[in-house]
Each structure stands twice: as structure tokens, then as C-alpha cells.
Image (cartoon, rainbow, N blue to C red):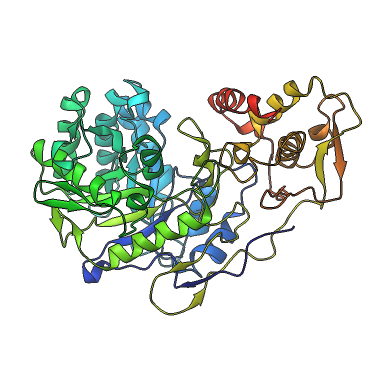
Amino acid sequence: MRSDHHPVTLLLLLLVSWNPNGVSAVGVNWGLDSSNPLPPSKVVNELLLPNGVTRVKLPDADPGVLQSLSGSGIGVIVGIRNDMLRNLSQSKKAAASWVHDNVTRYFSDNGAGSGVRIDYIAVGDEPFLLSYGQQYQPYVINAATNIGIALKAAKLSDRIKLIVPCSSDVYQTNSSLPSKAQFRPDLNTTMVDLLSFLSNHSSPFVINMNLFSSFQHNKNLSLDFHLFQLTSKPLTDGHSKYDNYFDLSIDSLVSSLSKAGFSGMEIMVGKVGWPTDGALNATSANAQIFMQGLFDHLKAKAGSPLRPKRPPTEIYLFTLLDENQFIITTGNFERHYGIFTFDGQAKYNMDLGQGSRPLNNVHEVNYLDQKWCVVNNNKDLSNVTASVSQACASADCSPLSPGGSCAGIGWPVNVSYAFNNYFQANGQSQEGCDFNGLGLITTVDPSVGDCMFVIGLRTSGSNSYYQRSAVLQRVVSLFAFAFLVYV
């Protein structure tokens, strides 16, 4: 497969455990929303372990992933998806079964031998998101309580902590000033219950940061401010001065916790990163600048203005690999947060200041055949819009978005891009390149400049997007990409 990724050098990547010196321990999110996932064993043995990853946050308790982590010594956060919260909140038996099937079965005290070192269970993923309304809010605390009861019965309550990852929209402010921030009024009772639960279990408050989305919607704060560039204009809030958005976000949460009566609660960052495609300013160059700025900031041990010398206890980068099935309701860039491409190749360099060392990529990737699906220019393309909508409803067309790596390829090459992604996601089947006779299979790489026409991976099980994608994803994709056909 053709690649534009240059040899990657970095000063010991990902993720060294810095807690002994008072600096945040750093881990990485490992998501699974991909049509062509790498085998979990390859991810562990060729990405996590060789690159020094010591902590991993998982969206759920996938058996294959947990088995691959057995004996690795990597600390693991196991997630419970939001759609399980109602059942777990209403049934102690269901909670006990979940703990038995997804924790006890794999657990190891120290990660040695055949067990998994499970450090946390994440109850839900941003269940209080404003766009969710009351969909999950009534069930979070009871679900966490029942899981806690099950852990105690399994004699694991003193070894595994419970956390509830929250989006940064759980707090709000009428300005960008942290001192004005407070938890949303609609969460007043729920948030007090959550904070009391976390305090009683000595658990941190977990905040997921979407700094790129904040940058897109906050025109008063510059790109440099979000990328830790010292040339940015500091923001003054009373006696506090901020020269980066990361600290601004942390102190907005600190202020909200203080106003709720929990000023001393520890903070964990569940997600933080920068995308590399799918929008203007979502580039590998900016992602590298952001990551280097973040790591330099953490190594300085300065903390934030409201918590000097007291940074978040742990920080999890978002994310390890690109995920071409990730829900894109907040933006097409959501599928491109990976430090590595979907096939395990590093996108950019990182300098951690600890000596030169190459970043290990996945080797011997099992690609599909060297063939692609393109539009047949000899056909009548007057009705091609419907075929592109079909492809983009299931496949990933996000690089065609304004500012994306394929935004400038024009028509009908962008049609070919959509066709090919659908074709690869469906295992290069003949039917996957039909499109009512408008598709054509070729062995000539149609990539254009930085716009790469990918080749999929051979994986066990189905490669089909339309079998695995959520209905919401289809609707969003249809809406977002139908306009691209004639660009």
C-alpha cells in the first residue's frame, strides 16, 4: 500500500508514567469503531508495548481486546456503554453479571501472568452530554452504585475505582473566564449526587476535552492559544493569567467543583488530543505541535493557575488509532484523532525530550489486494448523487469535508473516493463497487497528492459498514456529504 508517512522519530513516545515526580501519568484511548480493525494482539505487541504505553482507556469490555492485554502489565480503564446504564441501574443482578463477565474473569492484581490490570471502570461515556437530554441522566448514579456493590461482593472494591467520564459541557460560563464557570443548572441535583459518590469512593472527576471543537466555536481565542504557543495573547481572569486553552479548561472545572462544594476533588482528563483531517486546521502538523506543547506543559509540573503544582492525576490522549466509524455528530474531524492511522502507521513526530527513539509502527499489515474502486467516466453520471449518498452513508467520506485532505480533488475524483472507501470497507467485494453500474475496479492507484485512496485490511468477521454502523451515523453521513458530489 502506498503511504505518505515518513520515518517517524520521537523522543520516547507514548506514554511514560510520571506520577512519582508529581507529573500526570499519561495513557491513551484505544477505540474500536473501525470497519477494518487491526488484530488486538498486533495493537498490544506492536504499538502499546514497544512504545512504552502504560495505561489504556477502553470504550467497553471487548473480550478480544481484554484477552490481548492479559499479562501486559498495562493499566486498563474498562468502559460501560451508555445504552447499558438503564439495565444496570435497575438490576443488581445485571450489575453482578457484568462485573463477573467483564472484570472478574480477566482481573489480575498486578497485570502479571494471564490477568489484566484493571484499574478503573468507567460508568458511561459522557452520559450528561447536553444533546442527550434526560436519556441517560437518571440512571448513572444507580448504575455506578450497583457496579460498586458487585465489586465489593467480588472483593475488588479496594482495587478498582469507579469513574464517570463527563464532557466539558457539564459546566458553562457566560464568558471564557474560569472564575465564572459552574455546572449546568439542569444538572444541579445529579451533579451533587455524582460528586458525593465519587468523593465517597475516592475517585477523581473525569473530564473529556474537545479542544478542537472549542476552537471552532470560540472565535475570541486563537489557534496558538489552543496549541500551547507562547506567542498567543494571554487571557486574564482576576489574578490568573492563561496562555493555553488546556489550563483554561482545567480551571473552569476547578471553579465549578469549588462552587459545588468539592474544591479538593482530583481531576483526571479522559480524552484530549487534536485531529489530523476532516476540517480546516485539523492537520498532522498542528497535532504534532499540540502534543509537544501538552507534553512540555506536563513535564514543567506547573499545574494550572487555580491548582499550581497540582496537575490532573492522569491524562488519556485521544486516540491511538483513527476510527472510520466514529459517530460524527460534532464534526467530521472526529474520525481522525489517531496518533496512528487505521493500519498502525504513525502520522507525526513527537519530541518528549528524553532522547531520540523511533516510534514503532505495525509491521506486516495484512492488506487486501492492490485494487481500488473508481467511477466509470464512460457512463452517464447524471444520477451519480444517489450512489455517492449510498457510499457516504456507510463509508467514511470525512476527508472530503472543507479543509480535509481530499477537499480539493474535485469532481468526479471525489466520487471515486467515496466509491473506493465503500468498496474497501466491504472487503473489496464485486458488489461493493457496483453502484448501479457506475463503479469500476482498477489496479492503478488513484491517489491524488495528499489524498490517499486507502486499501482495507483483511480481518476476521464482517468488514461491512452497513452491517456495523449505527442508524444515526448513516443519517449524519447522508446529510453531511451529499453536497460533495459536484464540488
Horizontal and vertical percent position of residue 170: 26, 33
Q: What residue is at 36 percent from the left and 52 percent from the top?
A: 224
Q: Quadrant of residue 420?
A: top right
Q: What residue is at 42 percent from the left and 28 percent from the top?
A: 83
Q: Say which of 402 and 70 sits in front.
A: 402
Q: Is residue 181 above or below residue 72?
A: above
Q: Quadrant of residue 102?
A: top left
Q: Is residue 156 at least partly visible in the picture?
A: no
Horizontal and vertical percent position of residue 181: 17, 36
Q: Is residue 398 above or below residue 297?
A: above
Position of the C terminus, as image quadrant, is: top right
Q: Is residue 61 at least partly visible in the picture?
A: yes
Horizontal and vertical percent position of residue 37: 61, 48
Q: What residue is at 35 percent from the left and 46 percent from the top?
A: 222
Q: Is residue 61 above or below residue 132?
A: below
Position of the N terminus, as image quadrant, is: bottom right
